[in-house]
């Protein structure tokens, strides 16, 4: 079995986020999708507990980790599906004017009703954006643009950044303002945005400190940052280890817990105000099916078995009440950057 990286080859390196703790060998894992063969090494900071792929891959390596069909549908087909879902959503919402539609759960109707409604029973988005006058939002890693389309329909000025060409093409075809490329290439105006969102994106970024400082530059003085990431400190990783679907090696480069994300925030001029723990039954069920069988054909069958679904529900509930869920969303406030990391003129 080929090992792409060897944690023991660089003993004692310092954490790229807190710069105080040394990195120690932590874990070996494989690509559970079977896209990239071999094993990958994770190391962990002995002080802030940040876990990361080691050595950190460069930009060229990162893009090689993604298969050509990472987005399931072609641009035209996916845009057509989104537009159809939006039309159905508007029609049904006029009949069932319920704000969150949580009573419908994850039924097809419930999903359609919520396709253009960026609220959630577990994450009160409306509370976080309350009181904002100049409603400008940037979605980094905006994918095919469903969230931005919802915000645009609610009267927000929307901007997006997306490195995947297929996804960016879909978003643009929906009439959205989306830059194809990386954030540091977009040359966006400083202090322009009131809200910036990173939804299951930060774990993919190979330069999180640089990215967070650029986000700090882009946000207004009272700007708000919303980050959602898998929780390596959660119950799922403790139970399933290398079979935990949330690892997604090697595409997930940095692996966060609430504590390590707090360290990253403090180092880059942010403060976590609130954390929302929300389970992911799909991660748990996939992890359980992988632990039972490595054959994809069997995994599809196992995931549908009632006992497996029941275990997924129970673990999801336990993770949520113990605040060790599969993923979490952090609401962060922008603070002035200290002189040591370089202040912008607006902070002086």
Image (tube, rainbow, N blue to C red):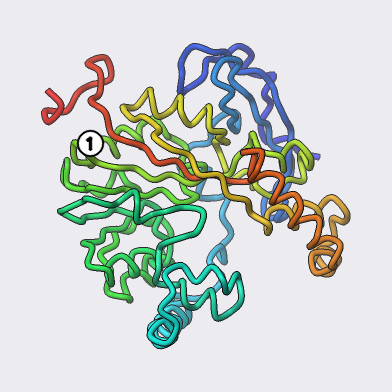
Picture layout, residue 97 above or below residue 64: below
> In the rendered image, is residue 249 in sight?
no
- Judge from the rendering whether residue 18 lies leftward or rightward of residue 339; answer left or right: right
Of the 4 image quadrants, the one containing the C terminus is top left
Picture layout, residue 252 above or below residue 78: above
Image point 28% across, 20% down: which residue? Answer: 341
Picture layout, residue 9 above or below residue 225: above
Query: Residue 311 placed where, x, y %?
Result: 81, 55
Image point 54% across, 75% down: which residue? Answer: 110
Please state which of residues 271 and 292 is positioned toward the viewer in this rendering: 271
Query: Residue 101 placed where, x, y %?
Result: 50, 71
Image point 26% across, 14% down: which residue? Answer: 340
> In the rendered image, is residue 246 in sight?
yes
Q: How many marks?
A: 1
Please state which of residues 102 and 330 is positioned toward the viewer in this rendering: 102
Task: Name the residue beneath numbered marker 1.
Answer: 217
Image point 42% across, 67% down: which residue? Answer: 144
């Amino acid at each position: 079995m080929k090992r792409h990286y060897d944690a023991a080859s660089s003993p004692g390196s310092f954490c790229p986020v807190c710069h105080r703790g040394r990195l120690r060998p932590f874990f070996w894992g494989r690509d559970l999708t079977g896209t990239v063969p071999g094993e990958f090494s994770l190391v962990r900071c002995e002080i802030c507990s940040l876990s990361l792929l080691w050595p950190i891959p460069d930009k060229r390596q990162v893009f090689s980790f993604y298969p050509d069909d990472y987005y399931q549908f072609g641009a035209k087909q996916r845009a057509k599906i989104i537009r159809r879902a939006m039309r159905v959503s508007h029609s049904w919402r006029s009949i069932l004017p319920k704000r969150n539609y949580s009573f419908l759960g994850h039924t097809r109707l419930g999903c359609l009703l919520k396709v253009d409604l960026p609220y959630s029973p577990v994450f009160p988005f409306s509370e976080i954006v309350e009181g904002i006058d100049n409603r400008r939002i940037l979605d980094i890693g905006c994918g095919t643009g469903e969230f931005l389309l919802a915000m645009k329909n609610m009267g927000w000025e929307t901007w997006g950044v997306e490195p995947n060409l297929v996804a960016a093409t879909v978003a643009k075809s929906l009439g959205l303002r989306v830059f194809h490329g990386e954030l540091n290439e977009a040359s966006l105006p400083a202090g322009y945005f009131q809200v910036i969102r990173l939804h299951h994106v930060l774990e993919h970024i190979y330069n999180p400190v640089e990215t967070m400082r650029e986000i700090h530059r882009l946000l207004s003085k009272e700007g708000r940052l919303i980050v959602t990431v898998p929780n390596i400190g959660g119950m799922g990783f403790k139970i399933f280890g290398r079979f935990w679907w949330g690892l997604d090696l090697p595409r997930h480069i940095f692996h966060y817990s609430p504590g390590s994300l707090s360290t990253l925030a403090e180092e880059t001029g942010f403060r976590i105000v609130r954390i929302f723990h929300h389970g992911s039954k799909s991660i748990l069920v996939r992890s359980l099916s992988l632990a039972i069988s490595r054959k994809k054909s069997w995994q599809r069958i196992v995931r549908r078995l009632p006992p497996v679904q029941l275990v997924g529900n129970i673990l999801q509930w336990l993770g949520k009440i113990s605040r060790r869920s599969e993923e979490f969303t952090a609401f962060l406030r922008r603070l002035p950057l200290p002189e040591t990391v370089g202040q912008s003129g607006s902070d002086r």
